[in-house]
Amino acid sequence: MSIEPLLAIRVACTISVEDERVLMLAKGTAIQKSFLVPLVALQAPESIISWIKGEYGMWTAFLALLVRLFYFIPGELDLPFLTMLLVIVAPYQALTLRGTQGGAIVSLAIAGYLAFQHFSRVGSLRRAFDQGAIVATLGIICIALVPCFFLF
């Protein structure tokens, strides 16, 4: 097995997670951002998941929980914390979906729903590519295309 397909998979996962991160933190998007949390958990590279499940990830989640208890955190900044908690408390069977065809189908279903939500709330395809929505539109298209590559 050559290194090129493995490198392409890593690059696609990294691009998808970066797009999901941008969508989590972007203001003015027309999607329910809470659907991005399981999508990140399913598509994040193994190195990120092992870091979150490791000692440093647990301490980061613990400190984020303490900050959240005493201070108000806006919804956009709360989603990365919820992603960490989801990965930490997810059962082994749920994380075994990562990198499989079943995980790609679940990711594609979530990404398809987010794409439907984005394009129906924006109003038209022309408005989806206006200056205010172009970042969200390109991010939605990218997170919808990446699971398609993993189906085959």
Image: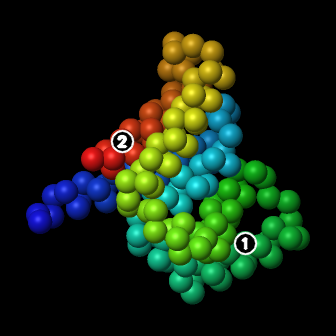
For label 1, the residue is 64
Q: Is residue 125 above or below residue 94?
A: above
Q: Residue at x 80, y 76 (%)?
A: 66
Q: Residue at x 46, y 62 (%)?
A: 97
Q: Is residue 24 left or right of residue 16?
A: right
Q: Nearer the viewer, mark 1 or mark 2?
A: 2
Which quadrant is the N terminus positioned in?
bottom left
For label 2, the residue is 148
Q: Is residue 73 left or right of residue 43?
A: right
Q: Which picture quadrant has residue 115? A: top right
For the residue pair 101 and 32, the one nearer the viewer reads as 101
> Which percent across, then down, holds residue 24?
61, 48
Question: Does label 1 or label 2 sit earlier along the sequence?
Answer: 1
> Which percent across, then down, holds residue 121?
66, 23
| Extreme residue in the left direction | 2
Q: Mark 1: which secondary structure?
A: helix
| Crowdedness near tag 2: few (<14), some (14–19) or many (≥20) residues, C-alpha within 10 Å | some
Q: Name the amino acid type tagged 2.
A: Cys
For the residue pair 66 and 82, the one nearer the viewer reads as 82
Q: Is residue 1 above or below residue 131?
A: below
| Extreme residue in the bottom direction | 55
Q: Name the amino acid type tagged 1.
A: Ala
Q: Mark 2: which secondary structure?
A: helix
